[in-house]
Amino acid sequence: MFQNTGNTFSRRRQSGDNRYTTLATNHHFQFNLGPDNNRHSIELHFRPKFNYAYSKSAYGSLSAEFSANPFDLDNWESIFYGPEADKSLLSILVNRVESQLRSNSTNISDGAETEMSAQIPYTPYYIGFDASFNAEHNKYNSFDLYNLENVEGTDRRHRYFDQPSDHRKASAGISLQTPFDQDWVWVATTRLGYNYSQDKQENSLYRLDWLEEMANAELGTLPSTHNALLEALDRTNSYFTTNNQHQIMLSFDGRYDKQVYRDNNSYARFRFTWKTGITLQTETWDYEGQTLRHDRRTAWLPSLGLEVLRNTPGMKHELELQTAYQQQLPPMFSLMGLRFDSDPLNIREGNAGLHRTDVFSAVFFYRSGSWLSKHRRNLSATVRLYAYRNAVATAQTYNTTTGVRTYRPENVNGNWNMSTTASFYTPIGNRGFSMNLSLSDNFYHSVDLTGTEAQTPVRSTVCTNYLSVPVKVDYTRNTLRVGARIQAAWNHAASKRMDFQNIDAADISMGVNGNVTLPWNLQLATDFTYFVRRGYNNDAMNTDDFVWNAQLSRSFIHGKLSLCLMGYDILGQLSNITYTVNAQGSTETWRNVIPRYAMLRVIYRFNKQPKKQ
């Protein structure tokens, strides 16, 4: 991690098993009452859904934090082996943690949404109605054995977490659309809406190591009686919360949309849209834990949006600008100002002095029209800008002796980000060649607060830029498709913060791919990719990998049954170590998986068309 008083270095190894089962169903029913393609008909949509998920996990992990770079020293895990520990590692060790975890979780959610629109008889007005509801129930419990060692000694914990939650949401709205002319050039829309949400959360932490009978208990077992379990309740870090939120929203939108036609075809267009709204939000918060709290707040939240769209004569170009402003309230949980230390290395605090956040945004779109489409070409570009006033940042205070971090939300100014994307497609000649050139650039001006226990947190500004330029050339002829691609990505991060490690790194990939139909309707697809990473300060991050993948597939029973044999990393050169770098630090991840493997996939499609009336 990049700290303003000197960087810290962490190593972590985690291994485990995770099993999960999911079931999901979604439906869409549409009803049209009245003549087809007639404004006097009523259109009704209904979309029910249901989801179920269950997971069971078991993990073991070793982690350590160092005051100096340990990557040049072998076998960092030796610090857990007593006399065999490397003395060079021990001299720079801040803390070490060994833990085991077992968990079970169940998630059940359902919901539905409906909408209807119709013209009011004998008037030019249209009325619309929409409603939705969602319900979600979560059950999560886990056991862990946690062993922390630092200069303050040893902290051993045997914990049981019980964290069920329920979430409910419902909404309804009615809108009135008013045209001021027969051609619907001027249109106004007024909408009145209501949202309701309820969130119930239990966070019960039981310190089983406080009970004598659990001294030698296996992981995953509970005390013999419920009363004994209650004696182990960590009341400082356990709580029940209920959050009820009501929103009444009134919006007034207007639109001017003028289109010019020539020979029954669109020739030009100008559209101007404005959106104004006000939301009355009433919220109640009940908390039972360290203290008993019943809080209530009422706030008015304004919003504003403007949009301008222009299609130039001949529909050659389309330009669109969207701007918006809205406000966000800080979570009431954070406003309590309480302190939680269930994780002894990461302490969380609230802040009763948080203010609402102002969010400003502007988006510009460009889309090519007839000037390129007549040549089968396409050009598009998007520029997005977001700026925040009183953004909520997480201030971090770091104890250099113990490695304990204390986090507290604070309002800061100066956060903004900007992104640009562009894409150009063109055929090359008339022999089946085509090229796709893209560009993506993301810039982040990030402001947060960092400090140590001996130093008040100070503003820390980091500027990060990610630039990516992929180019792809394809050739298609009958059942053969071949392509070549190259992508260069540049990652730059800089800060005036003390001891910040500036980053200038590049990730480059290049390769070819192909797809061809073989005899007996076999489909063969394959790709070769060469990955290059350069410019990272850690030499282990500067890697070269050559990857070859292939798959062979065939369909049966008129496309209902598909068999596919896939082979990944056939040459066995892909590393199972990945690296990521951002403004706060760099992360090296080693996964104990087999990157080189083969898989057989079988798919059967059930599809029944409705009977014609």
Image (spheres, rainbow, N blue to C red):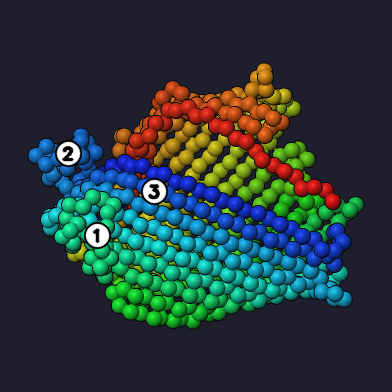
Look at 71% across and 61% down and name the residue there. 45
Q: Is residue 149 left or right of residue 137?
A: left
Q: Amino acid at mark 2?
A: Ser
Q: Nearer the viewer, residue 607 or 581?
A: 607
Q: Nearer the viewer, residue 506 or 81?
A: 81
Crowd class of label 2 (few under 14; some 14 to 19; many from 20; radius 10 Å): some
Count every numbered label the image shows and give the total. 3
Q: Amino acid at mark 3?
A: Lys
Report whether residue 524 is seen: yes
Q: Amino acid at mark 1?
A: Pro
The CA distance from mark 2 to mark 3 is: 30 Å
Q: Secondary structure at mark 3?
A: strand
The CA distance from mark 1 to mark 2 is: 35 Å
Q: Earlier in the sequence, mark 2 or mark 3?
A: 3
Name the residue that disc number 2 marks: 78
Which one is in front in this view, the residue at disc 1 or the one at disc 2?
1
Name the residue that disc number 3 marks: 56
Residue occupying the far front of the picture: 224
Name the residue that disc number 1 marks: 223
Q: Earlier in the sequence, mark 1 or mark 2?
A: 2
